[in-house]
Image (cartoon, grey):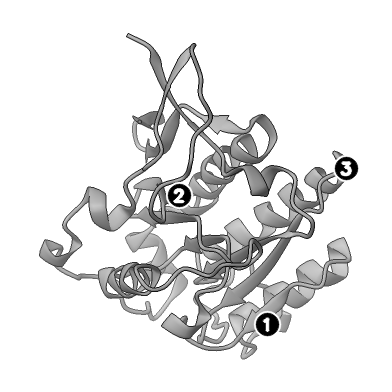
């Protein structure tokens, strides 16, 4: 049996301008992912690629509970999360990324890759519905992939899905997969009961809900997959399951 692979949407490998990314949620995982994306973009530019252009969305402000578990400092208390971190990344890497101090809406669907780092199923279902809409014709605004990060106290998963089908080249050596299921196609999130997704009153309470390193570990593994997609032009799995308690990472095969 031939090995299953998915070839990255060709335009993303040699675009005429930076690949557009909408990052939804700049909290525990999102703050870590944004920093990883900056490293990915800088490294891609070193390889002759235009890199990434990220627009980050989050309506929340930095609180004392966030400091330590999320990538915020005491000097950023009261600032909008997206504005605080995007400003820092722009100064550090010389990028011109954008921050939106608001919820992500259907009208915002204009990026090649949507990355969700949200803590509730309602937001994921909203993104799913928005991505089912009319496709953009321009290469820089056409939605192609949806990457979702999700976690519990010490476990998590990353799922890379395609928005529709991605045309695959002919390959004698591999069996190509044009359609990868999104998080909402892989699991029936309407049956998931929301619990413990609200804000915590203290850092101790927050750490009781989520391990100190679950977000950063998940972000590293997920962005490593994106890096592989962008540099090798293909992947043989569409995500992963992470368990910090057992220190195991299992791929989600195509």
Residue identifier under label 1: 83
Residue identifier under label 3: 46
Q: Secondary structure at mark 3?
A: helix
Q: Position of residue 102 (x, y in %)?
A: 52, 88
Q: Secondary structure at mark 1?
A: helix
Q: Marks 2 and 3, Cα distance to the nearest angstrom?
A: 30 Å
Residue 192 figure quarter: bottom left
Q: Marks 1 and 2, Cα distance to the nearest angstrom?
A: 24 Å
Q: Position of residue 89 (x, y in %)?
A: 77, 67
Disc assigned to residue 214: 2
Q: Is residue 70 visible?
A: no
Left or right: 42 as drawn, with respect to 61: right
Quarter of the image with the C terminus in it: top left
Q: Marks 1 and 3, Cα distance to the nearest angstrom?
A: 26 Å
* Tag 2 and tag 3, C-beta contact below 8 Å: no
Task: From the image, state whether disc 2 or disc 3 is nearer to you.
Answer: 3
Please state which of residues 150 and 232 is positioned toward the viewer in this rendering: 232
Q: Position of residue 209 (x, y in %)?
A: 33, 62
How many numbered marks have been drawn onto this rendered protein structure? 3
The residue sitting at 46% across, 68% down in the picture is 135
Please state which of residues 243 and 108 is positioned toward the viewer in this rendering: 108
The residue sitting at 27% across, 75% down in the picture is 122
């Amino acid at each position: 049996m031939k090995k299953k692979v998915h070839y990255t949407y060709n335009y993303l490998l040699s675009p005429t301008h930076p690949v557009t990314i909408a990052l939804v949620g700049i909290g525990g995982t999102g703050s870590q992912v944004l920093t990883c994306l900056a490293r990915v973009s800088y490294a891609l530019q070193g390889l002759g690629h235009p890199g990434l252009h990220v627009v980050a969305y989050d309506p929340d402000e930095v609180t004392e509970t966030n400091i330590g578990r999320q990538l915020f400092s005491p000097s950023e208390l009261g600032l909008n999360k997206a504005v605080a971190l995007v400003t820092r990344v722009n100064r550090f890497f010389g990028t011109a990324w954008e921050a939106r101090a608001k919820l992500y809406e259907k009208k915002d669907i204009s990026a090649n890759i949507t990355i969700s780092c949200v803590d509730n199923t309602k937001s994921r279902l909203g993104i799913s519905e928005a991505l089912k809409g009319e496709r953009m014709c321009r290469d820089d605004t056409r939605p192609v992939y949806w990457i979702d990060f999700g976690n519990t106290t010490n476990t998590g998963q990353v799922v890379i899905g395609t928005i529709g089908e991605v045309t695959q080249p002919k390959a004698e050596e591999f069996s190509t997969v044009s359609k990868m299921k999104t998080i909402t196609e892989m699991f029936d999130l309407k049956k998931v009961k929301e619990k413990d997704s609200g804000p915590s009153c203290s850092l101790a309470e927050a750490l009781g809900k989520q391990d100190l390193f679950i977000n950063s570990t998940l972000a590293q593994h997920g962005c490593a997959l994106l890096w592989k997609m962008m540099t090798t032009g293909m992947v043989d799995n569409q995500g992963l399951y992470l368990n910090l308690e057992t220190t195991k990472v299992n791929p989600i095969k195509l």
